[in-house]
Amino acid sequence: MDNRAVGIFDSGMGGLSVLKTAQLLLPAESFLFYGDNKNAPYGTRSPEEITRLSFDCAHELVKLGAKALVIACNTATSAAVNDIRTELKLPVVSMEPAIKPAIEHSKGGRILMMATPRTCVQSRYLRLLDRLDQAHQVVNVPAIELVEAVESGDWSRQAFDRVLQKVLGPFEGQAIESIVLGCTHFPFAREHIVRYARAHFQGEPAFYDGNLGTARQLGRVLKEQGLEAEPGRAGVTRLLTSGDSARILPLFNRLLAQYDPF
């Protein structure tokens, strides 16, 4: 048994959706969450910048005593996970867009993969597409504006509608079978995306994200490595940010309180 905390980091607030899923799935575990809000978003930065910033986050959590790391960011995973795993002597759990289950459940329709611009062109994601049949169904939809909307703290319907019209407007009236939320920020806007899809697309798309699979993989890794927390205890969570704590930490708590991954 190991009651030390699991470290989770993201470019900003999006990784809180992974944290909330892990909290519910692994209630005995404690967590350290680090949001690099000062440097968010990562999705328009160069691979070199993303790797440097990801290492800064990882080192901060290791310094605080994390027993394992979760990179709760598809963009950071694509750019930096291999280097972080090579350098750090602890388990590192990563993410990838949930393209595979979307294709496995597909009936041949169009799949929109919403992500940051950088995720859409990273070699790790492109290799994933190459391994899958029917990858021609997938349409990449860069949506950095949606990341910025979540980070802004203005989560009103009007704010999200403006962003979604810009991002998804080109698909007006089309038949969309499923939508992959390929950034951990996007589950926080899921109800707005669902509402928009119902009003503007043919049919009702299925939705996929990688959060539950990541939390399950974390549980498997902790068990395999002998790092599980003592059963029956109640884990605790500490929230940290590189940004303005007085403004951002209350937003962290609001997001965690209102988000239900299940």
Image: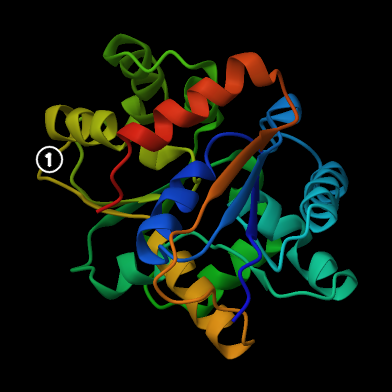
Does residue 210 appear in the picture of this structure? no
Q: Nearer the viewer, residue 228 or 19?
A: 228
185 with respect to 51 (left or right): left
Residue 194, image x, y percentages: 21, 36
The reply, left or right, for residue 117 in relation to residue 51 is left
Tell me which corner region of the image, top left, top right, bottom left or bottom right, holds residue 80: bottom right
Which of the two residues, 144 or 211, is positioned nearer the viewer here?
211
Measured as percent of width and height from the top left, residue 228 is found at 55, 78
Horizontal side of residue 207 vs 245, given as left or right: left
Seen at 82% across and 43% down, the residue is 53
Q: Residue at x 77, y 59 (%)?
A: 65
Q: Residues within 10 Å of mark 1 (few under 14, many from 20)?
A: some
Q: Is residue 15 above or below residue 214?
A: above
Q: Residue 44 versus residue 13: which sits nearer the camera?
A: 13
Estimate the x, y position of residue 40 in percent, counting from the top left: 68, 30
Q: Which residue is mark 1?
A: 202
Quarter holding the C terminus?
bottom left
Q: Quadrant of residue 156?
A: top left
Name the residue located 48 percent from the left edge and 25 percent from the top edge. Answer: 150
Local SS, label 1: loop
The answer to whether residue 213 is left or right of residue 95 is: left
Number of residue marks = 1
Q: What residue do we see at 85% from left, 70% from top?
A: 88
**At label 1, which amino acid type do we have?**
Gln
Position of the N terminus, as image quadrant, is bottom right
Q: Compared with residue 204, is residue 125 higher up or lower down, i.e. above or below?
A: below
Q: Residue furthest left?
A: 203
Q: Look at the image and tell me whether residue 253 can be seen.
A: yes
Applied colour scheme? rainbow
